[in-house]
Image (cartoon, rainbow, N blue to C red):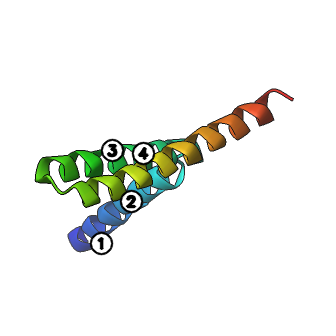
Amino acid sequence: MKTKQWIGGLALAFLAATTQVACQSKTEQKSEEVRDEYKDVVDAQNEGDSSDVRDEQAELDSARQDYKELAKDSTARKNP
């Protein structure tokens, strides 16, 4: 019986974790992407490779632009 309870508890924990991730809004996901890209730029700067910095900066700029467009679209839908 304890094994079934243990498995049930783990399944419930897994379900709760995946539901929380699935419920994130698109703007939250994009903002996390921007944060990740920013960290990549900082890491590339610390390594000192200028070509990597340019590549990572381009990815960061793209992620920021995507976020701005998504945020603008989401506010436009709320205020018709």
Q: Secondary structure at mark 3?
A: helix
Of 5 and 22, the residue lying toward us: 22
Which amino acid does the dot numbered 3 rest on?
Answer: Tyr
Q: Which residue lies under the disc numbered 1? A: 4
Of marks 2 and 1, which one's residue comes earlier in the chain?
1
Distance from label 3 to label 4 (Cα)? 6 Å
Residue 43: give its label.
none
Which amino acid, by three-letter code, is at mark 1? Lys
Nearer-the-camera pick, 58 or 14? 58
Which residue occupies 81% across, 26% down? 79
Q: Which mark is residue 12?
A: 2
Circle 3 Cα neighbour tier, 10 Å, few/some/many (<14 / 14–19 / ≥20):
some
Query: Where's the C terminus, which quadrant?
Result: top right
Q: Are marks 3 and 2 in contact (CB under 8 Å)?
A: no
> Of helix, strand and loop, which one carries label 4?
helix
- Quarter holding the N terminus is bottom left
* Front position among marks 3 and 2: 3
Q: CA distance from mark 1 to mark 4?
A: 42 Å
User: Label 4: which residue?
Assistant: 34
- Give the foreground label among 4 and 2: 4
Mark 2 or mark 1: which is in front?
A: 2
Circles 1 and 4: CB distance less than 8 Å? no
Mark 2 packing: few (<14 Cα in 10 Å), some, or many (20+)? few
